[in-house]
Image (cartoon, grey):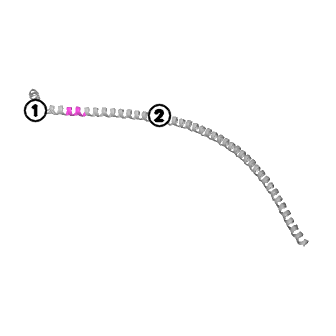
């Protein structure tokens, strides 16, 4: 802001050229002061900006390191937990396979025993039926032989009767 007027007393004492020189001096000093103040404020602002940026970078690095550490800890925790769960499931699967294998073995033994019992029962029944059939066949043979004997006796009797009748005449 330049000085436009110089008081009259000062103008009379200094003269017109002196007053103009004084105004120029004051304006130059004001401009110089303004430039110095602006430079000082810029430097202070830059320093503060650098400090804030460094502080922000440090905090960002600390936060990133903290997150990285937490991520590593969480990942390790999950890996450990996953390992435990896999071990539990593997143990459970092994137990279930063993239990099912025992059950299958028991069922096979039970079915084999039942099959053996059924085979023995069927063999006994077949034997009984065969014995009954043999008895029936032998009875049928006896009846057949008896009837054959009766038939041949009848045939011989008829033949003898025909022969006696033929030779008697």
Element on which disc 1 rests: helix
Q: Position of residue 75 (x, y in %)?
A: 50, 37
Q: Position of residue 123 (x, y in %)?
A: 75, 49
User: Which residue is pictured at 45% across the width and 35% down the height?
Assistant: 67
Among numbered discs 2 and 1, the one appearing first in the sequence: 1
Mark 2 highlights which residue?
A: 70
User: Which residue is pictured at 49% across the width and 35% down the height?
Assistant: 74
Q: The N terminus appears in which quarter of the rendering?
A: top left
Q: Residue furthest top?
A: 9
Q: Which residues are magenta?
A: 28-35
Q: The C terminus appears in which quarter of the rendering?
A: bottom right
User: Which residue is pictured at 75% across the width and 47% down the height?
Assistant: 124
Query: Residue 34 falls in which quadrant of the image?
Result: top left
Q: Examine the rendered structure and indicate whether residue 22 appears above or below residue 134.
A: above
Q: Position of residue 98 (x, y in %)?
A: 64, 40
> Please, what is the dominant secondary structure of the magenta stretch?
helix
Q: Position of residue 119 (x, y in %)?
A: 72, 47
Magenta includes 6?
A: no
Which of the two residues, 22 or 98, is positioned nearer the viewer here?
Answer: 98
Q: Examine the rendered structure and indicate whether residue 169 appears above or below residue 88.
A: below
Which of the two residues, 53 or 40, is positioned nearer the viewer here?
Answer: 53
Judge from the rendering whether residue 86 lies leftward or rightward of residue 140; answer left or right.
Answer: left
Q: Give the distance between the C-alpha atoms of the residues marked 2 and 1, in whole angstroms.
A: 79 Å
Mark 1 highlights which residue?
A: 16
């Amino acid at each position: 802001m330049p000085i436009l007027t110089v008081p009259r007393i000062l103008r009379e004492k200094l003269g017109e050229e002196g007053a103009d020189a004084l105004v120029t001096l004051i304006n130059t000093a004001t401009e110089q002061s303004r430039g110095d103040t602006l430079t000082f404020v810029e430097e202070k602002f830059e320093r503060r900006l650098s400090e804030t940026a460094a502080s922000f970078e440090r905090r960002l690095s600390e936060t990133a390191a903290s997150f990285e550490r937490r991520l590593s800890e969480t990942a390790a925790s999950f890996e450990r937990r996953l390992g435990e769960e896999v071990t539990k499931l593997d143990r459970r699967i092994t137990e279930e396979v063993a239990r099912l294998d025992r059950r299958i073995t028991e069922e096979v033994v039970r079915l084999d025993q039942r099959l053996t019992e059924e085979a023995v029962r069927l063999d006994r029944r077949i034997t009984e039926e065969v014995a009954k059939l043999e008895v029936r066949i032998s009875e049928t043979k006896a009846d057949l032989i008896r009837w054959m004997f009766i038939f041949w006796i009848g045939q011989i009797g008829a033949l003898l009767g025909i022969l006696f009748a033929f030779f008697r005449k």
